[in-house]
Image (spheres, grey):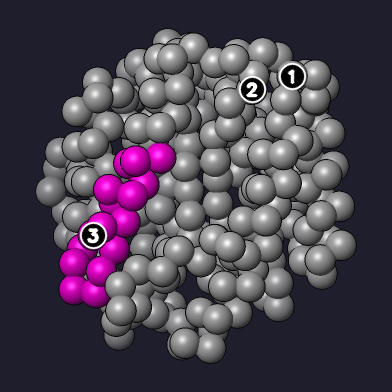
Amino acid sequence: MSRIPLKTDSQIAKMRESGRLTYQTLQLMESLVRPGVSTKELDQAAYAFITSHGGVPSFLNYHGYPATICASVNEQVVHGIPGDYVLKDGDIVSIDVGACLGGWHGDAARTFLVGEVDESVKKLVEVTRQCFFEGLKYAEEGRYVEDISRAIEEHAVKHGYGVVRELTGHGIGRRMHEEPEVLNYVPRIKRESVRLECGMTIAIEPMINMGRAAVRFMPDGWTVVTADRKHSAHYENTVAITAGGPIILTAE
């Protein structure tokens, strides 16, 4: 018997609601991101929005995480803690957020441009988005998680970017993190890959670096940065595997 929780159609419908709230929160974040806004202000707005719609912020107090969103600026890959940093023209900020409704989680991330951003950085953000959709093509019943991983890695490498290895996508449902692990690369040492089944719900989330793949974990215990301090981008959605093909649950 699979140790990966499979969801019924009705459970996926419930996850669709939490996913929609997650998506709407990101839409709000996009409308607020501009020079002069602090990451703490974004976090406060996300908390107010999720709770006012009957949701619970999935990240807040998760393993001690102190905020509603992760706000990772420029060379920060993921898990940047919102604070006094004020966004400035030319920055990029990756916002990762989760919302829980009725005991079911949604999880998604986007990298937003702040003001006028260098063309090379814009390209990184767009290619990272493309990496997600390349992987999504293989999120089908009967295929393997490794098929998703390979598609993401190949698209990033084709553009000369580094693919983060220490952090991965994951299963999601009643818990924020479930099996299976969804890598963004294919390990050099061959291992058995998980076969995708209808009812699986997974978070596919490419984390792509402009430079090398290597990252560093900061002393705050959360923030992850690129080792070479070059920019990084993040794009994530919660996806359901169904007989009719993959469904993005964190969408309008």
Question: Element under label 2?
Answer: loop
Task: List x then y, in percent, for residue 178.
Answer: 47, 65
Which residue matches tag 2?
Answer: 114
Question: Element under label 1?
Answer: loop
Q: Would residue 210 be found to the left or right of residue 91 on screen?
A: left
Task: List x then y, in percent, for residue 122.
Answer: 45, 22
Of 244 and 10, nearer the camera is: 244
Other-residue count near label 1 (Cα within 10 Å), few / some / many at <14 / 14–19 / ≥20: some
In which quarter of the view is residue 54 placed? bottom right
N-terminal of the two: label 2 or label 3? 2
Task: List x then y, in percent, for residue 49.
Answer: 81, 55
Image point (37%, 63%), residue name: 180
In the displayed structure, 178 sits above or below 182; it is: below
Q: Amino acid at mark 2?
A: Val
Which residue matches tag 1?
Answer: 35
Marks 2 and 1: CB-CB under 8 Å? yes
Which residue matches tag 3?
Answer: 138
Q: CA distance from mark 2 to mark 1?
A: 6 Å
Asked if the magenta segment contains residue 208, the reply would be no
Q: Please say whether residue 33 is visible from this viewpoint.
A: yes
Asked if the magenta segment contains residue 142, the reply would be yes
Q: CA distance from mark 1 to mark 3?
A: 38 Å
Q: In front: mark 2 or mark 3?
A: 2
Boundaries of the magenta span:
129-144
Task: List x then y, in percent, for residue 23.
Answer: 62, 56
In the displayed structure, 220 sits above or below 118; it is: below
Image quadrant holding the N terminus, namely bottom left
Question: Element under label 3?
Answer: loop
